[in-house]
Amino acid sequence: MVDSHGNESSVTYFILIGLPGLEEAQYWLAFPLCSLYLIAVLGNLTIIYVVRTEHSLHEPMYVFLCMLSGIDILISTSSMPKMMAIFWFNSTTIQFDACLLQMFAIHFFSVTESTVLLAMAFDRYVAICCPLRHATVLTLPRVAKIGMTAVVRGAALMAPLPIFIKQLPFCHSNILSHSYCLHQDVMKLACADIRVNVIYGLIVIISVIGLDSLLISFSYLLILKTVLGLSREAQAKAFGTCISHVCAVFIFYVPFIGLSMVHRFSKRRDSLLPVIMANIYLLVPPVLNPIVYGVKTKEIRQRILRLFHVTTHTSNP
């Protein structure tokens, strides 16, 4: 932005866009988006409730699943209310500091979720490759420490992002290309050298997504090597305990990598593709994770069915 004297002045707010080219339809498109958000919140709260109330599920794998569900609720909640305000009430402005807070929250929860997915892979590795040591290696206090480590890691890596953005001057456009604030989107609006932001963002992606995905892949190579030496029945049981986590990994990393690639190579700021990818990234994992675990995990599926059975009988005496 430029003031009346022709001097550079930093913006005090940003403008968030809805769906480029679909402005007239986005009011109605907000209804399915809102429905997906409610499904995500309800599904993940159900997972947390089931694991908390079922003592047989008080095991590391399910505790990590509760962490994953909590993160999914928070990451979708950090963006969806504002998105609904944009689509329904045309409330497109967001204050500069509020944008930085939302940006930090989204990236912080993303890093934390990646760390939890890595911890879940380690849990599956110990359970299948070193089953006799599983109870002593992954005790509940140690699982809690891993969860705290995930939070500290996310906060430590993401805290510099709003600080870097705060130092930049914004003297041109203040229109963002998404319905919420992302670091790679905000920094492109700066009218200064953003190499520090680009380099730090690349370091974070490599040290989090690159490292975590590599370690997860390595753990499953070791799991595969162990499982291939088991009987056919044992193989099916071992793979059955891993399939939900493998799905969760793909559900999280594929949209994340897709969104990163779109930001890296897309040249058109008015393109609808980055907006669609951004919405998929924030909504699809929270919606699909509880469905995958509810369908693929026998213990959770049975407990949910019992819960609905009791609820039905209570409401229909």
Image: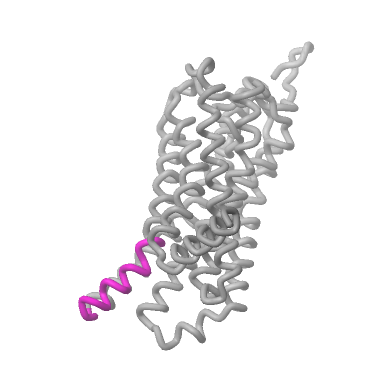
**Magenta highlight on residue 240:** yes
Q: State whether residue 71 is above or below residue 224.
A: above
Q: State whether residue 295 is above or below residue 143.
A: above
Q: State whether residue 77 is above or below residue 95.
A: below
Residue 80: give x, y in percent of width and height: 60, 37
Give the camera-side residue of 20 and 247: 247
Which residue is found at the position 48% from the left and 70% from the top?
A: 61
Residue 274: give x, y in percent of width and height: 46, 31
Q: Is residue 60 left or right of residue 230?
A: right
Report the number of numbered marks. Answer: 0
| Residue 140 seen by the camera | yes
Give the camera-side residue of 262 and 224: 224
Q: Is residue 28 left or right of residue 7?
A: left
Q: Quadrant of the N terminus?
A: top right
Magenta stretch in the rendered image: 229-245
Q: Is residue 207 left or right of residue 83?
A: left
Q: State whether residue 10 is above or below residue 234.
A: above
Majority secondary structure in the magenta region: helix
Where, by quadrant of the figure, is residue 242 drawn?
bottom left
Where, by quadrant of the figure, is residue 167 drawn?
top right
Q: Quadrant of the C terminus?
A: bottom right
Where, by quadrant of the figure, is residue 8 drawn?
top right
**Magenta highlight on residue 242:** yes
| Residue 69 seen by the camera | no
Give the camera-side residue of 54 and 217: 54
Residue 244: give x, y in percent of width and height: 39, 61
| Residue, far right | 5
Which residue is found at the position 75% from the left and 27% from the top?
A: 12
Which residue is found at the position 45% from the left and 49% from the top?
A: 288
Which residue is found at the position 46% from the left and 44% from the top?
A: 284
Residue 192: give x, y in percent of width and height: 62, 30
| Residue, far top | 4
